[in-house]
């Protein structure tokens, strides 16, 4: 196979949860640019459809759709609609995350922890579960988890400014996603279903606009071998790789995208 063809996603159908979010936008865009039909899904259907329209204006294929990962019926409805309309699901990117219910251990309450877990981990499990029957029927598919550097190493609290926090339950949820990646890869390899995970390093636009965080920015850049934070578009290539035939024998991989910060 020509190497250029190996990365093509022509005709493939990809669902991206949280597909109009911080990392979701470049992921959805990258898949569409490589030829995939992209289903951009989240609780904010209007935002998803607006971004899908931007992609369609560029002659790319995308639609926006409502998805609530805390609602089993919503998950099933999305998968059923995609299968009915297109007949196959080739790629699932578990990217959605709920950030408002995370905190350090002494701040956490059972109710907020469970609500966060319901989306940030349980929702990823159930979304994967929902696409597996179709992928097993096809005897092929790619599931890609968007985890975090937080799942690869303990926080470096000494680098943080007093105003900053490193949420404990977010780290635990992302560690769970890494474990889920390994379990699914081992279980469904016989069906040619590949499951991989990317772990992007720290990124928040506020870091460069909040004067109180400039000390952290300088400290992080000093400690990171590549001396900078990840840029949003840098998740595109790894996701396209895992979605495409270029990674046809790659499964169970946990890929850091952190400029060697975890090395």
Image: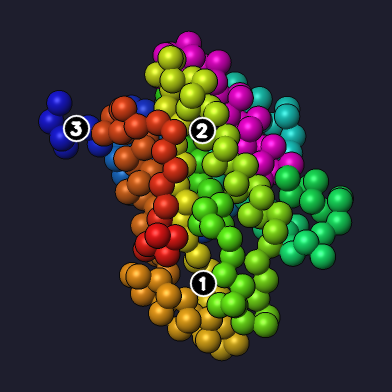
**Residue at the location (37% across, 28% down)?**
12
What residue is shown at x 13% (from left), y 31% (from top)? 2
Q: Where does residue 5 sit, x and y in percent of width and height?
A: 19, 32
Marks 2,1: beta carbons within 8 A? no
CA gap between label 2 and label 1 equals: 31 Å
Q: How many marks?
A: 3
Pair 2/1: label in front: 2
* Residue to which mark 3 is pinned: 5
* Residue 45 belongs to the span the image colors magenta: no
State the scheme by which the image is colored.
Answer: rainbow
Q: Is residue 168 above or below residue 222?
A: above
Question: Which residue is outermost to the left?
Answer: 2
Could you tell me which secondary element the residue under label 3 belongs to?
helix
Q: Which residue is mark 2?
A: 182
Residue 41 figure quarter: top right
- Give the residue pinned by disc 1: 205
Residue 218 drawn at (x, y percent): 45, 83
Q: Position of residue 90 (x, y in %)?
A: 42, 26
């Amino acid at each position: 196979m020509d190497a250029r063809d190996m990365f093509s996603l022509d005709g493939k159908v990809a669902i991206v949860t949280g597909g109009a979010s911080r990392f979701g936008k470049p992921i959805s865009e990258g898949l569409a640019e490589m030829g995939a039909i992209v289903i951009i899904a989240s609780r904010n259907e209007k935002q998803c459809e607006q971004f899908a329209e931007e992609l369609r204006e560029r002659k790319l294929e995308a639609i926006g759709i409502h998805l609530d990962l805390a609602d089993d019926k919503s998950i099933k409805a999305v998968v059923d609609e995609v299968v009915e309309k297109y007949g196959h699901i080739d790629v699932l990117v578990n990217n959605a995350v709920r950030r408002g219910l995370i905190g350090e251990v002494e701040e956490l309450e059972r109710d907020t922890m469970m609500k966060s877990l319901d989306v940030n981990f349980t929702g990823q499990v159930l979304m994967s579960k929902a696409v597996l029957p179709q992928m097993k029927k096809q005897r092929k598919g790619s599931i890609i988890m968007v985890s975090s550097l937080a799942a690869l190493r303990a926080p470096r609290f000494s680098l943080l400014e007093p105003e900053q926090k490193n949420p404990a339950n977010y780290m635990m949820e992302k560690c769970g996603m890494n474990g889920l990646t390994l379990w699914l890869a081992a279980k469904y390899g016989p069906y040619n279903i590949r499951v991989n995970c990317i772990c992007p390093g720290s990124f928040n636009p506020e870091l460069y606009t909040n004067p109180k965080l400039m000390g952290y920015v300088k400290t992080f850049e000093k400690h990171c071998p590549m001396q900078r934070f990840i840029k949003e578009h840098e998740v595109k290539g790894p996701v396209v790789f895992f979605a495409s035939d270029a990674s046809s024998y790659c499964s169970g991989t946990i890929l850091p995208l952190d400029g060697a910060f975890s090395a």
